[in-house]
Amino acid sequence: LTQEDMCQVFSLPSQLKYQSDSGVGIKEIMQLLSRSRCADNDCDDFMRFQVFQWLIGATDGHAKNFSIFIEANGAYRLTPFYDIMSAYPASNGKGINTRKLKLAMSLKSTSSGNKWHLEKVYPRHFIATAETVGFCTIRMQ
């Protein structure tokens, strides 16, 4: 099967893999996945994975770490997740300051703007993001 990461799908150079560098975020990827061959499952898996990344402190969930399989007939579907690493082991002792840990893709703030820092993200931000991207907020809970 042919596979493309999200930078390739959206015709972005590799250096724009982070949303903060003008790369794609959850909204754009969800729009793409809503048209996949397995749209319901793909959207559900992708949104649940955002929560998982937050829980384990995975700060490198950028556009090159999400891909789709492209089938012979042009249909596509989300690949299994890969390159998943928690930053928490490096935050002990004199390592990374946990207050500086940020998600690679932002969540919608419940007031205004976006949420990036792990310590400032709460479940309500996932629900606000789900609402923004048209994903079932009940499912997100």
Image: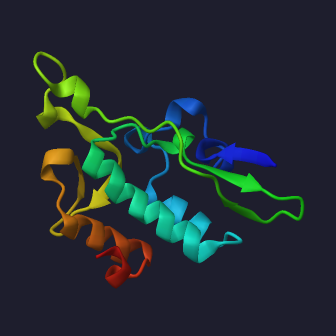
Q: Residue at x 53, y 59 (%)?
A: 29
Asked if residue 138 is positioned above or below residue 126 in the image, the reply reads below
Q: Report the number of numbered marks.
A: 0
Q: Which residue is drawn at 20% across and 45% down?
A: 117
Judge by depth and name the residue closer to the eye, 78 or 125: 78
Specify the quadrant that holds the C terminus: bottom left
Q: Which residue is drawn at 28% across and 50% down?
A: 54
How far across and down, in percent of the image, does residue 138 sit? 33, 84
Specify the farthest residue to the top. Answer: 94
How far across and down, in percent of the image, does residue 51 sit? 32, 58
How far across and down, in percent of the image, does residue 94 sit? 12, 15
Judge by depth and name the residue closer to the eye, 115 or 51: 51
- Left or right of 66 on screen, residue 128: left
Asked if residue 95 is positioned above or below residue 49 in the image, the reply reads above
Give the image quarter of residue 41. Answer: bottom right
- Left or right of 53 on screen, residue 16: right
Give the image quarter of residue 90. Answer: top left
How far across and down, in percent of the image, does residue 135 sit? 43, 77
Q: Which residue is drawn at 27% across and 72% down?
A: 128
Asked if residue 128 is positioned above or below residue 115 in the image, the reply reads below
Q: Which of the colour schemes (rainbow, by chain, secondary structure, one colour) is used?
A: rainbow
Judge by depth and name the residue closer to the eye, 27 or 59: 59
Specify the farthest residue to the right. Answer: 72
